[in-house]
Structures are given as structure tokens and as C-alpha cells.
Amino acid sequence: MSKHSEVVPNSTLTDDAAAAWGRAGFSRRSFLVGTGALVVSFSMKGALQTAVAQGPFEGGTAGSPPLSQLDSWIAIAADGGVTTYTGKAELGQGISTAQIQLVAEELCVPFERVKLIYCDTAQTPDQGITSGSQSHPTNFNQKNLAQAAATAREALLELASKRLGVSADQLIAADGVIRAKSDPSKKVAYGELVGGKKFEIKLDPNVKRKPASEWTVLGTPARRPDMPAMVTGQFEFVHNVRLPGMLHGRVVRPPAVGATVVNVDEGSVHGLPGVVKVVVKKNFVGVVAEKPWQAIQAANKLKVSWSAGTGLPSHADFYNYLRTQQPTRDTLLVNSKDVDEKLAQAATVVKATYYCPNQMHGSMGTSCAMADVQGDKATLFSPTQGVWPVRNSASILLGLKPENVHVIFRRGSGCYGLNGADTVTYDAALLSQAVGKPVRVQLSRKDEMAWGENYGFAFVMDERAGLDAQGNIVAWDHESWSANLGNRPGYSTPGNVITGTLAGFSPEPFMPRSPAPEPRAYTNNSNGVPSYVAGNVGGKPQGTGTVKSERSLTHNIPSPLFTAPLRSPARLQNTFAHESFMDELAARAKADPVAFRLRHLSDERLIDVVKEAAALANWEARPSPKPQSHRTGVVAGRGFSCVAYEGENGWAAMVAEVEVNQDTGKVTVKRIFFSNDSGPISNPDGLRNQIEGGALQGMSRAMGEEVTWDDQKVTSVDWESYRSLPLGFDVPEIKVKLINRADEAATGAGETSITIVAAAIGNAIFDATGARIRQVPFTPQRVKAALNQTLSQV
Amino acid sequence: MSAINLKVNGKVHAVDVDPTTPLLYVLSDDLALNGPKFGCGLGQCGACTVIVKGQAIRSCITPVKSVEGAEITTLEGLGTFEKPHPLQRAFIEEQAAQCGFCINGVIMTAKAFLDKNPKASEPEIQQAMSGVLCRCFTNVRMLRAINRARDGMTTEGRTREAAAK
């Protein structure tokens, strides 16, 4: 193993290099960004599915303010105002409010005195991507922003000690002023100590954080400072950035997947009002005009001849396609090597297959960016999740030096993963470069949905388990198939998104590998490992369950459509399978689903959320399905599910109460109960908002959302063909129990609830009707089909 | 191009645009308003909603010529930081947003509906909001905020609120 131990300059580790290291068997979690050198630990965490790796890569691009320097994070002005610089962006999840609270708390200043600047390559440190439930663990534990704020407080106390001639432990900081405990008239304000000057010190790795018991700002439901501007139409989204002399661009995407440009007839738009230029770069085509409506009309009229597309596999048969393509990239997560033997000895063997389709981010507003590329310099206003990665990848796209590309984050429409933010940034950059003027691009709805974003992954998952005569699980076997193409562009792969590929760059290569190597270090890997198995790798159980005979094997193939992380990537799909299957096993054992889960869990925090959710819902212990006689009309039931998100990055459990109309197949979710543990709660209202939103977004994904295509192109291109639940649907009552763990590390909080929704609803449908639904989304037709199948078995 | 007079939030603006241009582009680009948003361009999501003659309309599919001279109200026209409209205040009170991109459509649709139905029941409000999207799914808070605003906009509601205090 020691041959993998390396020390490399941290500036050389691009995102793709990190992915390559991941493919070589290292988890991103083992990358420790330190003081100018990056030490790759040799604790092997093999089996990383690169397409869905979301670990905390914490930056370090050349040119970034160094993460180890206090001045990269905090500045104090002469008037005592605190400016904070962070690399974690506000995407609507509320992290900007929580980061202000964190800094106000550690620095002992009021919330209102902290100004937060996030994600601007001219000002903020490179913290990689804002994604993967990593902002809370990255900036709220003993490192980065939290450590910076605490280091600043201690440094100010030291300065005050010298100024006042009082030892630091006899001083107290409050409201931006430091006073002597014995004589409050002996005081000095922060602004007098450092006002306008730099600290010029490093973050203190041993600095003492304020204990949660002393918090007065962090941990409170502080209000979002952006709300008044939002509700009065004053808030500036990226869509509202206006530069002097700006033009408007419109892209012209291919009519079919794989189609390439044969000819562009620029004369077809000659003389149209406002048209400035037709831009072609390989298969990237766009029009620039003076006004947005002119650009749209010109793009519609531009005559482009395209080659035939390369074709798409049948949508109706896609799950079979996933299962049968060769070659594959195979990964074993756990393998006790006795699964087949234990299954052969089991009293009962249960098997089931589950299906999840490609789904969209489907952001409310189509993606938009503003670029100003003049000569060898570029300024990009982008809603990207990673300004530093886009700075480098856009520099490759534009043929400029990275240090000449300035990326400024401006908020876009809700972002649940890699929506069209990076692609549209490239669109605007290419068009602006062609005209040498600022160009704004906002995609059409169709381009957003068919040619803008990278979709969430489709999955087929086989589950197999054995029960002994007492109904205990004795072996669990999980095998999945999924497909991916492209990814986040990272620092060096513009071809990972559609515009980059159209402009002539390649997506990261598919690396087949079969058979899978034996796992050498434990990783939960996107919840590919069920919660109920021991996770024994290297002689040590590291999972959250008790079942010792275990195997989890994944297969990846190239996807026909671009894919990337979408909120709870792969974790949601795997958890749908595991938690539905657990319910099937409980039913086969004639056991109560909650008691059955508790019997097979070892992780205390997961056990606690299970118990809390059951208590909140007044869960009645009994096996499913609910005893009943009638097989027509409306019946009610309840279902349970839970997850340890990524094994250790947030814990949640849920009860869904549903009504099923057995005549129509329509499912109505009446009430939802959640328990959630994300460590210390930084803002309970913000956390509730995330849990509520995740619950309903999870419902929409469970009930209606599915990317569709014909033999040439994507056909889900608007809100008629891609079915989202609207604002005013029959919204269930949602009750949330927050578990506060003040002494634990901060974990992810934005993806726990959405991960467990589909299984809880599916399990409730089973409880109500005895019909098992194993394919997302649960359309009335599928529910009806499941009901008919159950009837035919009676 | 032709000169068109638009009356937006009480002010008259003369714009020189293609008369078939959807109203949204004129509001966003020519008048530099941030309230109305482009969501779909198809009238399916509500993000672009403005109120014309008391009706909530989808400005992304409304030719600008067709509303010449009519009183157009955008989110900016409802209230200000200092004096927010009851709906705007209710959304702040309930912290009813995530990304906030849909807020324009939600508030403007609710405004037009509550103006005509000041005593609407919760199910009626829910029904009225069934043509509007929020992809962050802030439904619970947004519907609560609309109900709260309804209470704040009527005498009975205000009395009820005072009694509760």
C-alpha cells in the first residue's frame, strides 16, 4: 500500500487528477490540503465511483488566496465591520446566512456587522465546488471558515492584551469590543486593533472554538438577509446583471444527439434587425444580437445543416440496456465471500429489482450567464457551483491564461446539482469572445432541458437476501447498473458538459474494469452499501448494520446522455432499493418494519432517528400490509424508511402516510414525519426549510419526474412533458423533529430528507394495498399495474 | 420597431421595440426590472407573472403591443423595503423562499387572486396556486405565507391575529 503514498504540490491536483486518484483507489476524503503540499494518505478507500464522487475537495488552485492564511477569510475595517470571504456559495440552501452566523458567533460581533463575500476568483479562496452536502462539514468544523473566525478572535484578544496591559484570559469580547473583566472601562474596539490592516497570521489548527452551550447567534433561527430584496423584486440574480454595451446571445443546439454541423448559412439571418454575428466553433453554434428577442428570432431563422444523429437506445427498454451493455466498470464495495453459501442455507430467499430513471434538475429559471471577453482577458458572471474550477476550465475553452479569467458568482435559479450553470457560462464566454463585447445568454426552456444540464443517473438495482427460520436477515446481496457521461468540468475538462463537447472538447474517458477488484478499504460509496450490513472490510465492521454476510457490486457503463450529480446522486436511488427491500423482508418475516430495522442496525445515530421518527408519527407496531378486506376505492397506509447519508454525513428517518385510490392508481401523500440529525444545528429554521423542500422535491421525483427520449433526442423539454408537482398540489402536512448534537461534528443537511422519500411512499402504498411498486416514478398507471398484479396473485 | 407607451407601476415609459416582443423582455431588458423572471417562455411556470387590469398574466407570452396603455403592475410595484405589501411581509415572516426565483410568480399570482377573493379558503388558495411552480419545493412555507397575508389583508383576519396575540 505504501507505493500509493505520495506528496504532490497541491496546485497540481486538478479535479480530474483527483478523479484519477479516485479511480486509482483513493477517496477524496483522504486528500488533506495543508501548507503548500498535498499529502495523499494511503488509507485505501477503493471502489470510488468517480461519477458520483462528492467528497470535500477543498481547493488550492494556483492564484487562490491561501486557505491557511487568516487574511484569506476575514478582514476587519476601521469601523469594526467584518468582511468574510468564503468559497461556499448561496444556491438557495441558506448557507450564506449560516456562514454569517458562524463568523458573528466566533468573532463575538452582531450578525448585521458581518458582510459575506462568496465565490469571486478575485477575492475568495478556492473551496472547490459547493455541492454534495459538504458546505456544512467543510466550513463549520475545526478547519477553514470556522477556524479562521476563531483564530481571528484569539488574535484580537492577544492584540488587546498588549494594548490594555491585561492578560488575554482576563479579557472578554462582545459586540466587537474587548473589555477587561475586572474593569469594563478598560476596552478597545476591533477596528482600533486591526482596522484596515491585515492580520498576516496563519489559521491556528488548535484554536478553541466557542462551545455550542455559549452560542447566541449560531444555532438560532436567524433570518435570511436576502429576503426583503427577493420579495420586492430588488434582488440581483445573474439574470439581472447588466453591463454597458451588452449584447444578447442565443445558442442553436443540434436537432439530434450526436449530430454535427455540416453547414451554417449565415446569409439566412442577414439583414434581420439587431443581428451582430453568427458564431460557429466546431458544433457550437450561436447568434449574437442587440436585444434578446432579436437573438431568439435570428436563432430560430438561422439555417444550419446537421449530420444525422448517432441514435439513442430505446427508452422503453433502457433498463435492460443498462443491464446488458459491455464493457462495464465494476466496483465491489463489500464482499464477505460467503453470500452465495449463506443464501443457499437460508430458510427463505427474497429477490427484487428496483428501477430509477434519469431525472432533471429542471431549475425554475433557465440557466443564464454574462461574459465579457475582450482580447486576452475575460470576466464571467456565472451561477456556477465552483468559480475556481470554471476559471480554469473556461480558460482552456477560450485559450486564455487562467489568471486572466475572472469568475464572479451571481445567484442563479435553484441548483440541485450540475444544472446548466457551467454550460451556459461557456455559451456566454464563447459568444462574447467572438464579438469582443459583453454577451448575456439565457437558455430557452427546451435547450435547458434537452441541451443544457447533465441529468441525474438512471439505475437498475437487484436486491437478494436470505432469512433464517426466525426471520433474521442472514445474508444481503446488492448489485446495481448505472450509466454516466461527462461530469462536473472541474478545473480541466470543459468537455464534461454539453457546450464544451460541442466546442470540440472531450468528456472524461470511460475506464472499463471487470471483474472488480476486492475492496481494500471500506467506503459506503453513495449508499451502495445497505444500512443493515456490517461493512466488514479489512477485518473491521465499519457499516451501520449487523448482517455479516454481505456483497455490494456496482457496474457502470457509458451513458447516451450527459449525466452528473443531482441532489443525493446515486444515494437516493440506492436507498430507494435498500429501504423498499427492507420493507419487503420485514413483510416476509411478518415483522413490524420499524422493529425489523432496529433488529438489524448497529449505528446509534441511525437507531435514534428511526426511533424518533416512529415516535413523532405515533407509529403503530404491526406487520405490513395493513389487514383489510376491500380491494377497491380509497385505502390508507403508512411506510417507513431511513438513511445514514453516505454512511456518516447526516442521519434521517421518515414516515409517510398515504391514501391510494385503487380504482385510478392515484396516490395522495397525507402526512410526512421526519427526524434528522446533522450534528450541531447551525440554523434550525434553515435546516427545516431544507428538510421540507427535500421532502416535497423527493415526492415530485418519486411521483412524476422522468427524462424521456425518442430514437434521436430528448422529448421531455417543458413542464408538460416533464412532470413536476406544482406549488398548489395537495401538499401533505410535514412534521420535523430535529435532533441537535452539539458535541458532534457538523454534517451534511441538504440531502438527507430527499433520499428516503420514495421508499417511504412506496412502502406506504404496500401497507395500504399489498401492492409493491418497484419503479420510480409512481405514476397512477404503474400503481394500477402493481395493484392488478397483486390481485392476480390473490 | 415601433414606439409603444407602457404604463408600469404608475409610470409611463416610451419604448421603441418590435411590437411582437413578449412583454417580459421589455420589462427585463428595456426597463431593467428584476421582478418578472423568464422561467419557460411557454406560460407554464408562472415566473414571469405581472398584473394587468387586475389579472395575473404571463408576460413571457404576451406581446407588448397588446398591453399598450394598460396599467401594468410588477413585483416592484407592490411595495418597498420600508412599506412592503402584506404578501411581501408575510413571505419575509415565514422565510418562504429557497432560491427565490419563483417568488415573483407566486406573489403576483396570489395578489391577483386575493384581491378578487379576499376570504378565500386554504383549499381555494391551493387551487389558485396550482399553475405555479417552485422547483425548490418551498410549498409549505409559501402557502402558509399566502394564508397569513390573506388574514392580514382583511379586517376579520387582523382581528383574529390581534386576538391570538
Image (cartoon, helix red, strand yellow):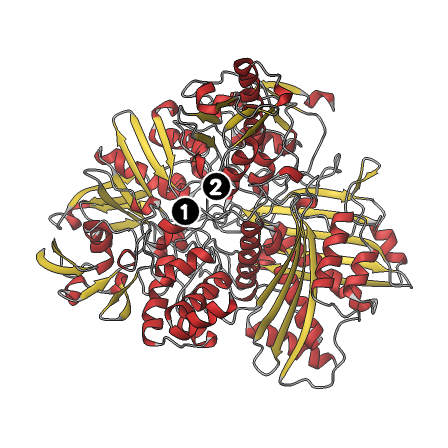
Q: Residues within 10 Å of mark 2 (few under 14, many from 20)?
A: many
Give the camera-side residue of A578 and A486.
A578
Q: Amino acid at mark 2?
A: Ser
Q: Name which residue lies at 70% across and 34% down.
A: A45
Q: Is residue A428 left or right of residue A772?
A: left
Q: Helix, strand or loop at disc 2?
A: helix
Which residue is drawn at the image coordinates 73% and 52% (left, top)? A478
The answer to whether B28 appears left or right of A185 in the picture is left
Q: Residue drawn 56% across and 74% down?
A: A780
Which corner quadrant holds the N terminus of chain B? bottom left
Q: Position of residue A483 (x, y in %)?
A: 57, 49
Q: How many marks?
A: 2
Q: Which quadrant of the structure image shows residue A495?
A: top left
Residue placed most toward the observer, B85 or B29: B85
Q: Amino acid at mark 1?
A: Asp
Q: Position of residue A234 (x, y in %)?
A: 31, 49
Vertical arrangement, residue B120 with respect to residue B32, above or below: below
A420 lies left or right of A652: left
- Residue on which disc 1 sits: A226
Q: Residue at x 49, y 70 (%)?
A: B163
- Cβ–Cβ below 8 Å for labels 1 and 2? yes
Count residues near mark 1 (Cα–Cα under 10 Å), then give few for <14, some for 14-19, many for 20+.
Answer: some
Percent across and percent down for residue A508 are: 50, 37
Whole-number angstrom distance, CA of label 1 to CA of label 2 = 10 Å
Q: Label 2 belongs to which residue?
A: A96
